[in-house]
Amino acid sequence: MLIARSVHPLAGEAERKERLLGLIDGFSSRRVLVVGDLIADQFIYGEVARVSREAPVLILNYSATEMVAGGAGNAANNVAALGGRARLVGLVGADPEGRRLLASLRAGVDGRHVVRARGYRTPVKTRILAGGVHSAKQQIVRIDREAGWPLGSSVSRALASRLGPALDACDAVLLSDYGSGLVTPALADIVRRRLAQRSRRRPVPVLVDSRYRLLDYRGFTTCTPNESEVEAVLGIHVNDDETVLEQAGRLLLERTAMQAVLVTRGSRGMALFEPKQPTVHVPIFGSDEVADVTGAGDTVIATCGLALAAGASFYEAARLANYAAGLVVMKRGTATVSARELADAVTSDHDTTIENWSQEGPPQGRRS
């Protein structure tokens, strides 16, 4: 899909804020297909009572347990929270964890295309959080219950056979690859071919979030890796060196042949790379005192997908995703951002003078 050239407004342009708010208003009419790995995120909360006499460990007084959808399920929940409609395709086990995961999907998420497979165990990430009565809960340990990943190629092919009806009338596709073997470059190519056969005037953006094999996905709309994932796939270390970051982003563009690459950098914000365009570095929105980064990448790709489906340029999608990421990392656990929260963030922050350009370039895009 060809996205409009990025619009980089000059400082003080009131139209930027109105444009972003208009895009958020457009989220409510957009339908996003989310295909990917479903993970049950479990949170066990407790208050620190004392140190054990049996071992140098904390004893917690149990408070509560919460289980929510992680992975692709969190991306779908973020789409719904932002006002869009999500259709979810993935795999869970016929077990209590799978049932609780599906029950945690928001009202705007259609989970009818999720496969409930006997003999498959829903992957669970259990995070134990502890704190005092008057202090914030902090994660002290995580326990992962794996599902027998990687899955066989036959499972991915069977999932692909169910994509036809799910692709109908979608305005964007998010591919969430956490490494199970369910989402593969071959499945992504099937999505691309089937979308190309649809008779609609506006092409559908396909966004990729792949933890381990990003370089195997080529020719899609955009991807949203975090900095550590970029370092892993390219075998480099950025270490706050913007020259190295620039080289890495340009290399990713070349090797993935995508229209744009959006690298998320935690407390350092984001960097947007487009072919033949100057790189733009967007500083983090809000405080850099991050509370919890769990699922923040899912929020980023959900916001980007909705924005592109609503007609945003890559720059505009990156700006909105940056606001959403800044909001969600201030929340505990696997969280979402609402359309109202996003609009309020845009309204409160309309100064572009602090943006950093890696190089000078002419004004781009339309101004009307």
Image (cartoon, rainbow, N blue to C red):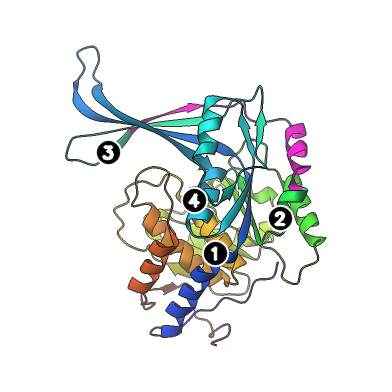
Q: Earlier in the sequence, mark 3 or mark 2?
A: 3
Q: With 328 as the anchor, is 37 left or right in this view? A: right
Q: Which residue is tagged 3?
A: 137
Q: Earlier in the sequence, mark 4 or mark 3?
A: 3
Determine which quarter of the picture holds residue 118: top right
What separation in Å lies between label 3 and label 2 (alpha carbons)? Answer: 41 Å
Residue 352 position in % (x across, y down): 39, 77
- Which label number is shown at residue 297? 4
- The magenta segment is 140-163
Q: Which residue is tagged 1?
A: 28
What separation in Å lies between label 3 and label 1 (alpha carbons)? Answer: 34 Å
Q: Residue at x 77, y 38 (%)?
A: 157
- Marks 4/3 in contact by CB < 8 Å: the verdict is no
Q: Residue furthest top?
A: 54
What separation in Å lies between label 1 and label 4 (alpha carbons)? Answer: 21 Å
Q: Residue furthest front?
A: 107
- Marks 2/4 in contact by CB < 8 Å: the verdict is no
- Marks 3/2 in contact by CB < 8 Å: the verdict is no
What separation in Å lies between label 1 and label 2 (alpha carbons)? Answer: 30 Å
